[in-house]
Amino acid sequence: MSFLTKLGLSPKDHSEAPVIGKQKKKKDQQSPIRNNIYIRVLIILGFLTVLFLSIPQPSFEETANYNIGEPWRAEDLTAPFTFAIQKSDEEVAQEEETIRQSTAPIFHRQPSVHIAMESRLDSLFQNIQPVLQAYSTWKESDRQSPSASTKDSLNFKQKKNTSGVNISNQAWNALLQNYQTTMIDRQQADTKTAPSYQFIGSHLRDNIQAILNNILNDGVINQPKSDLEFDEITVRNLQERTEQTLNTANVRDVQQANQYAQYRLSQLYNKNITNVGVEIFNQVIRPNLNYDAEQTQARVDETIANISATKGAIAQGQVIIRKGDLITQEKYNALKSLAQARSQNASTTERWVQFGGDALAILAIVVIFFFYLYLYRRHIFMNNAMLLLVLLTMSLICVGSSLVYQFTDLSLYVIPIAITPIILTIIFDSRVGILASVTLALLIGLINSNSFEFVTATIVACCLGLFSVRDIKKRSQFFFTTPGIVFISYGIVIIGFTMASLQGWDPLFTDLIYVGINAIFILFTYPLILLFEKTFKITTDLTLIELSDTNLPLLKELMNNAPGTFHHSLQVANLAEAAAGAIRANGLLCRVAALYHDIGKMENPEYFAENQMALNPHDKLKPRMSALVIKAHVTNGKKMAHEHKLPELLIDFIKTHHGTSVIKFFYEKAKEQCDEDKDEIMEEDFRYEGPLPQTKETGILLLADGVEAASRAMKDPNYSKLKSLITKMVDSRVNDGQLSKTPLTFQDLSVIKDTFLNILVGIYHSRVEYPDDETEDDQKTEDKSEDTSDKANLQPDDEDWENRSRPPVDDYYNS
């Protein structure tokens, strides 16, 4: 029991048989779901529902596409009914701008400002009077007794500092000088005969008051007059509930009010007193007309809202445009006006009729796509999961286009339609991607205004884009090559249509900007593929490229634990990849599968000839047990593949890379060792459990595995021997029925043979003998001539060289 456990053949390992049975039962239970016709119908109906919901509201536009500057290609168009001509967006925008520039700003008059300024003026002069009196007292005291005037001086300074009159020292000096002169003149004058000398203060106050009244009556606005871009303003008095329009020349801002006051005072007083009056004026003046931005904007909005959307009408029966006429801006507006009028006046029946027409056209387009899948890609159509994947990717683009269509400012060129065909090309093949490109272009072009230009540009860009990912090797193809190709393809087609229709360059640059955004969106293809791989459990070339890295832990372990097997796998990978490329099969899949097909040998590497260095464990085993050990590497390989979460696609290669072939070496050995009835030796005990390969790639791997192993056992390989070996190996597999379930043809097999031969001849080509190696080579020749053992003369037609017992060391190196 311990020996069997060491080989991985204990009852615990044999328990895999019922496990496989459970998996098969589970798979059989899942199969009806995957192939259930009712589920398939639901998926198709769901896809059609998405398409029908993506159809925008009926626009009732003319079926012909038209742009300004192009000739009208349809028949003469007459007005089916009388309708108003809608103004163009440019005309409406121009009227709105005119309203904004012509609407006078609104100001509110503040009557309380006049009273407040008068009160402030009185307060200032009342505060000035005590300061002047204190000054007069101080000067009189200083004249009579200078030593006793200190107290009066301090009192004057205190009065001045606490007066609250914020004027300059020059103004104070002018006031004090005028007041002192007036007082002296009064003392010296004869009150009966001399004229009356009065202080200038009361006179100055009255003049300032008069100036303020004059200015406030005209109006003082609360913002610089230079900021006003209008010749008139609207003044509202909320108290009196009045509104009047004033010319801006008749109102002043604060700066102009200051200049006016200075001019008037200069006519009445000298320079010093004028400056005093101006400083007092500045402390008093306040705007009495306040700008109301909200009311102004409200009036602008109200006026804009009342703009008429139409400009005249076209009577029923009047010719709108004739065939061949150039579409001018005026004609374009008339066509758009007719479409809007039809949309507004259309009945429910007309709307349903148009919707039904769009639906029929969509069905016609989709039926072509479904027929293609059913006739030429039935494995996709019959697999509900794969069909769901295809229709889901197409639905995402259709939904995105319907969303973009809702925004009139966005162009359809922003829709990254190329994402879907690129994904389908990577997952399936380029033909599915091309048909998806044509289908999506037609669908979205139909849903969105029947744009022939859009359909053409999309088909060209998508087809060229998917060609760049047919053989995906590097991630840079997603991030640079493919987006660049899509952008250039779109650009060429758009430029061509622009030049042909003489539309001008402005629309071209706008479309190219949207195309650039479209190309950037293609960068999301890579994460979407990863998402679909995880969700639908599929294997793409991207995954295979990652698995082909020999630095991955599983391949590192194979290289360290079974170096001979690892080297054998590398050679098989080269053969399989080259053969697959020659018959247009998936070479990358063959290469990656070849790297992993023998990972099961890591469980017991010493039992396989390529890993043996000295002792041969099979010498101690019976042939039946040896065959059991050899067959176990397939079971162990499947187990390890599941543990390392390898894709099922690669696990199929592990299960089928020997098919149900016979382990011939041990089968013949068992018959030789049987002393009695050789019929007791059952061939089935020495056959692999299979299953048989069912694809071109699995069939190629089966052939490459056997040919590479047999070629290693050949003595002195040359072109003739290798050709004979390959022919015999391939023919024996065909005759044994190992390729009966694969789609490989005889032509394919002929190409595969030639490919194998070219590679093996290159590997085993003759080398130049160097003088230093003559002695060693002579010794090897003598050893070969002396070797008469049967095991030393193993023939390359022994089809399971890699699985048979390893010969003695000397004979092995001579073989």
Image (tube, rainbow, N blue to C red):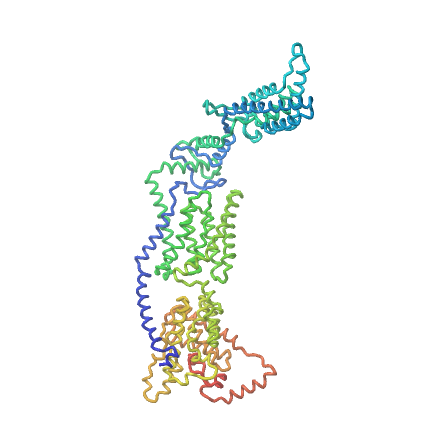
Please, is residue 155 above or below residue 614 in the view?
above
**How many dots with numbers?**
0
Residue at far top of view: 193
Please state the horizontal and vertical placement of residue 710, each as a whole percent of the image.
45, 78
**Which image quarter holds the N terminus?**
bottom left
Please state the horizontal and vertical placement of residue 632, each as a whole percent of the image.
38, 76
Please, is residue 757 above or below residue 249 in the view?
below
Is residue 457 in sight in this rendering? yes
Please state the horizontal and vertical placement of residue 327, each as a whole percent of the image.
48, 38
Q: Residue at x 53, y 45 (%)?
A: 509
Choose between 428 and 132: the one closer to the eye: 132
Choose between 140 and 10: the one closer to the eye: 140
Is residue 751 in sight in this rendering? no
Please state the horizontal and vertical placement of residue 533, each as a whole percent of the image.
41, 61
Q: Quadrant of residue 173?
A: top right
Please, is residue 532 above or below residue 771 in the view?
above
Q: Left or right? Give the position of 101 relative to 16.
A: right
